[in-house]
Image (tube, rainbow, N blue to C red):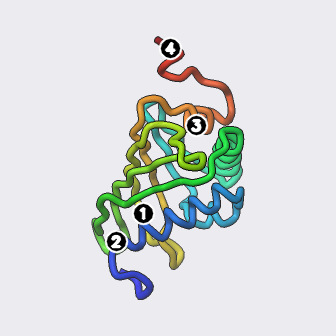
Amino acid sequence: MTADFDSAREIADSILQKSGDALLTNDFEAFAALFTVPTTVETFEGRRVLSTLGEMRTTFEEVCRHYKTQGTTDLVRHVVAAEFVDPSTIRATVEARVLAGAQLQQAPYVIFSKYVHQDGAWKIAESVYVLDDAPIYIRALTYGKRAQTAKEKS
């Protein structure tokens, strides 16, 4: 543990709050500081390793664009479980909700994340989004190219 935090849960909560704020205010620098490079993002539709800050920025901008278009006002994410795997690695499970006012924009979903202590700070190294219809992340993972949603495929 580090001096600023008492638990793995507090570390994960802090990073979630900061990353959510960065997404909602379109602050890439604040967002990027919370991630390792490379970092991995995965959904059922695919896995992408963001190997450069440029790739991360493109993905970030696509997610922010989608949130703005949909009228997203809040990202409510709750750490369900978090534990240290070793002194410099945390695994966490998060439940996430994307809201426009009080309205859910999609069904709540789960994120499994790996956090690592790197360069004196805790950062997200891997995120696995467990949702079956993920248009936000499909577009982000494909750098804005429109991909079919599960509903469109059926």
Residue 100 in the image: state x and y as whole percent: 60, 46
Q: Earlier in the sequence, mark 2 or mark 1?
A: 2
Residue 55 shows in this picture: no
Name the mark on residue 136.
Answer: 3
Left or right side of 111 for 51: right
Disc 3 residue crowd, few under 14, some 14–19, many 20+, Cα 10 Å: some
How many numbered discs sit on the rendered protein? Answer: 4
Identified at 44% across, 72% down, the residue is 117
Residue beneath disc 1: 115
- Which of discs 1 and 3 lies nearer the camera? The answer is 3
Identified at 52% across, 53% down, the residue is 39
Residue beneath disc 2: 8
Q: For residue 65, which quarter of the picture?
A: top right
Q: In the rendered structure, which amino acid carries the disc numbered 3?
A: Ile
User: How far separated are the C-alphas under marks 2 and 1?
Assistant: 9 Å
Element on which disc 2 rests = helix
User: How far separated are the C-alphas under marks 4 and 1?
Assistant: 34 Å
Q: In the rendered structure, which amino acid carries the disc numbered 2?
A: Ala
Name the mark on residue 153.
Answer: 4
